[in-house]
Amino acid sequence: MSFITYVIYFSIYVGLVGTTFYILTFIEDLKKEREFFTDDELPKVSVIIPAYNEEKTIELTLDSILKSDYPKNKLDILVIDDGSIDKTYEKALKYQKEGVRVFKQETNGGKGRALNSGIEKAKGDFVFTMDADTIVDKKSLKAMTRYFKNPKVMSVTPAMVTRETKTIIQRIQSVEYLTGLFLRKTFAALNAIHITPGAFSAYRKSFFEEHGGYDEGNLTEDLEVALRIQHHKYIIENAPEAPAYTIPPKDFMSLLKQRRRWYAGLMKNTWNYRKLFGKEYGDMGMFVLPMAWFGIFIAVFMIIYYAIKATNDLIKEVLFYKSINFDIFNQIEFNSYFFERIFFQITTITALWFVLIFLVMIFFYLRYATKKIGKTESLYINVPLFMVLFAVLFGIWWIVSIFYVALNREVTWK
Amino acid sequence: MRQIQSKKRYILALLIGTFIFLNGFIITNTILSIQFNRVSQFQDQTSYAIFKDKLNYELFNADPCTTDNFNKISDDLSYQGASIGDLEEKLGKNNNKVKFRKEFYNLVELEHFEYINDINRLCGKNFTTLLFFYSNQRNDLDKSERLGRLLDFIRSKKDNLVIYSFDINLDSEITRNLIKLYNIEESPTIIINNDKRLSGDIELKDIEENLISLKKVIVKL
């Protein structure tokens, strides 16, 4: 066996043990009893919506929050216009009559600054941070807030899913988000959530008062907050029954830019919070974070290896077919043994049996997701696209992000 | 300090993960074993058919020119060669069971080669025989694989061509004798109708030209 074969089987083995561990955790967590706020106990919450040039979506976002079944007298909604040069501010102002408080910052200072300004103005003991193109289910606010009954819970994440997925790139992301639902719940069971979605998450306001607000210079300020919460050994919960919908990037380049920012931010912030690795942080430090980084390392290694191999093979194939004047049909001899041999060749690739197991797991994750959020968009088209293209995209995003961090290139929001 | 929730769960995950992992290999090995048995059985049947035809005319004076299952046997041999190659790739070159099957396969090939030569001589047929000496060693692998594919391509277009493949690195007496007999010094090498010899970087046109020139000789005769 070659070195690469050992690497492949070792990663498969680690993946199988890891996946089994997560499933066992998920099953055990079903028995766990949690404390929840009842309807009468629901506290006052503030929803902070920082907006920069979001005239196309801001109304939809506000409408979705206003439709929420959260008691209106306990709901405080703030729009922080972050120096928009379009009609975002004017459109938000129309909602003042519905009780929405609208503030304008003269210059664009970034999401972190807008959020900090919102937290200062918030009247609720709990704050929801929400992107101006996210919409939420009417039951999501209530469902997430209930988890704060436990005073150790500092943040609650929703079931983050996509909407309006039209392009191939968006369809792939929609499955990625759906499969993430199961993992997020499992990470919550292990108290190992280390990312709170910037698009929609809830926080206990006292955390910001005690430990400072958002890191305004940070590229992924939401990720930094999550790591900080973990660093202080508080709890981040997940409410899979609380869907929040975001529009994912439409094309390859805008997605690449988004992921480059996320992953460069993840690398830098993980390095800053490297203390989270190790015994002191229980399952997260000993298992979840090392596993996540092992997975990333393997994905990058594999994508580089297979990209080189595929290029070499392609060149060889082209040269071969050139030598037979591209007479492809005569090259393959379709006799009675052809399919038998193909069947044998495929079924004796051990790694493919494991791929099959992982595919079954993905279907299990999707089943969980559809059960939690109800109707999902065209899974029959999206899942095959995801299976074929996601690993390649994932590798590319990481390679580009590593390149940017290694060369200390500037990574920007847009 | 946060505690690990359950050490038992880790151990259980390790056991279940290991069980699934090992089962993946068990499934593959079961299929390999089924395929090995199938190829072995098939090889026995083919060799039986060749030996029977050959003995019928050698010992019992049966007319060899009436049998017309050459193409079928040629297909069978080609499939067996490819399948043994697959098994070798999966089970390793040093697997004794595969090594034996490969040696046996060479024996059957030579028997068929001799039989085809007899048919050509006795029945005025013009089957073209092509001996293909290849190597699986790293330095020669690419060239050998490429030529193997070229030969498959030519074979699919030419009905009366029978190809016999021999791994020059196979540790067997037959292979050593063949290498000596045909004076094989480099890989890949092909010998067409016991006469024309091509070695090294062989192109499609080289083989085709040699096959055409043979045809002309046959027609002339």
Image: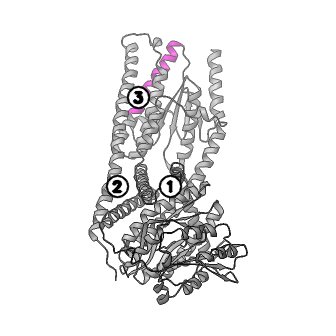
Q: Nearer the viewer, mark 3 or mark 1?
A: 1
Q: What is the crowding at mark 3: few (fewer than 14 residues within 10 Å), some, or many (at least 20)?
A: many
Q: Is residue A25 in view? A: yes
Question: What's the residue type where badge 3 is placed?
Answer: Val
* Chain letter for mark 2: B
Q: Position of residue A237 (x, y in %)?
A: 41, 73
In the image, A215: left or right of B97? right
Residue A182, picture quadrant? bottom left
Contact (Cβ within 8 Å) of mark 2 with mark 1? no
Provide the residue span drawn in magenta. Answer: B104-124
Image coloring type = one colour
Q: CA distance from mark 3 to mark 1?
A: 60 Å
Q: Nearer the viewer, mark 2 or mark 3?
A: 2
Please tell me which residue lies in front, A72 or B80: A72
Q: Position of residue A357 (x, y in %)?
A: 39, 52
Residue A54, picture quadrant? bottom right
Residue at image x 64%, y 36%?
A324
Question: What's the residue type where badge 1 is placed?
Answer: Thr
Residue at image x 67%, y 82%?
A104
Q: What residue occupies the far bottom of the structure in this picture?
A: A210
* Residue bearing mark 2: B21
Above or below A333: residue A245 = below
Please tell me which residue lies in front, B18 or B120: B18
* Residue bearing mark 3: B108
Q: CA distance from mark 2 to mark 3?
A: 39 Å
